[in-house]
Image (spheres, rainbow, N blue to C red):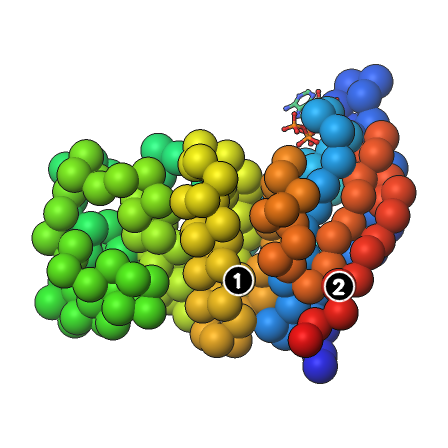
Amino acid sequence: MSTVLAGHGLVKKYGSTTALAGVDVEVRERDSLAIMGPSGSGKSTLLHTLAGIIRPDGGRVLLRGARIDDLGENKLSALRRKRFGFVFQFGQLLPELPAEENVALPLMLEGTPRRQAVERARRWFAPLGLDGLEGRRPGQLSGGQAQRVAIARALVIEPDVVFADEPTGALDQNTSTEVVRLLTSVTREQGAALVMVTHDADVAAHCDRVLQVRDGRISSHHQYTVA
Ligand SMILES: Nc1ncnc2c1ncn2[C@@H]1O[C@H](COP(=O)(O)OP(=O)(O)OP(=O)(O)O)[C@@H](O)[C@H]1O
C-alpha cells in the first residue's frame, strides 16, 4: 500500500530543549499508528509536526509525496482543513450547536451549504453508534458519545489522515475501548490513515503499529500482526 504521510529526519528545538532529534516515520493508507512514550518525550510535538501545526527546524513532512512543511501559512491551513481530521482529548465540540451541526462544521467552513452539510454529517451517526443523537447538544451527551461525535466530525471531510491526541484520555476503561475500536475501524473503512498519541497501552494495541518515543527519538517500533 502506498505511503500517505512521511516525516524524514524531523528535528524540533525549543531553546535548549530538543523535542525531536531526527525522527523518521511513514504512514501508509489505512494504516493506524500509535505514538507512545514518557511525558515530555516528544509525542505531541511529533503529531503536531506531521499534521502541519508545528513547523520542524529540520527535515521534511510529505503528504502523498508532496512536501507540506514549507507551504505558506494560508496554503497549509487550507490543506489541514481539507486533508486532515483531528480528534483531541475533550472540549472540541461547540456547546451551543446540536451534534449534527458540530459534525457538519468542517464542511460548512469549506463552503458546503448548511442543509447539504448537515445531510452529509448525518450519514456518520449510524456507523458510530450515534443514531438518534443528531439533535443533542454536547452537554446532553456522555463523554464517550461526545468523542464519537468528534470522530464523525474528523471524518466528515473524508480526510487522508486522522490525527488523534489522547482521544480516550478523559474516558473510563470500557468507554475508552469502545471509542478506540470505532476510531480505528471507521477510519480504516473510510480509507484514511490514523496517527494517535496515547499513554494507554490497551488503546495503542488497537493500532497496527506502535512507535515508542524517548528523548525525541524513536526508541522502538512494534508491528501487531493484523488478523
Ligand atoms: N511550546 C513549547 N515551548 C517550549 N518547550 C516546549 C514546547 N512544547 C513542548 N516543549 C518541550 O518539548 C519536549 C517535548 O514535549 P511534548 O509535548 O512533545 O512531549 P509529550 O511526549 O507529548 O509529553 P506529554 O505526554 O506530557 O504530553 C518537552 O521537554 C517539552 O517541555
Residue 167 in sight here = yes
Q: Nearer the viewer, mark 2 or mark 1?
A: 2
Determine the residue located farthest toward the front in the rendered image.
174
In what quadrant does ligand 1 lie? Answer: top right
- Direction bottom: furthest residue: 1
Task: Name the side, left or right, on which 187 lies relative to 144.
Answer: right
Give percent across and percent down for residue 2.
71, 79
- For the residue pair 199 and 94, the one nearer the viewer reads as 199
Residue ID at (39%, 35%): 90
Q: Position of residue 55 (x, y in %)?
A: 67, 42
Residue 30 to residue 142: above or below: below
197 relative to 182, above or below: above
Foreground of the two, 166 or 70:
166
Question: Residue 34: x percent and y percent?
Answer: 67, 51
Q: In which image quadrant can residue 13 be found?
A: top right
Please give the name of the residue rendered at 11% of the width and 67% of the height, measured from the top-left corner. Answer: 115
Mark drawn on residue 224: 2
| Residue at mark 1 | 184
Confirm or deny contact between disc 2 and disc 1 (CB under 8 A): no
Nearer the N terminus, badge 2 or badge 1?
1
Circle 2 packing at 10 Å, graded few (<14), some (14-19), many (20+), is few
- Check the image and report above or below for 159 versus 10: below
Residue type pointed to by label 2:
Tyr
**Image quadrant containing the N terminus:** bottom right
Q: Is residue 121 visible?
A: no
- Left or right: where does residue 35 sit relative to residue 218? left
For label 2, the SS is loop
Relative to 30, 112 lies left or right? left
Residue in front for this viewpoint, 60 or 190: 190
Instruction: Say what amino acid the circle numbered 1 marks.
Output: Thr
Q: Residue at x 40, y 63 (%)?
A: 155
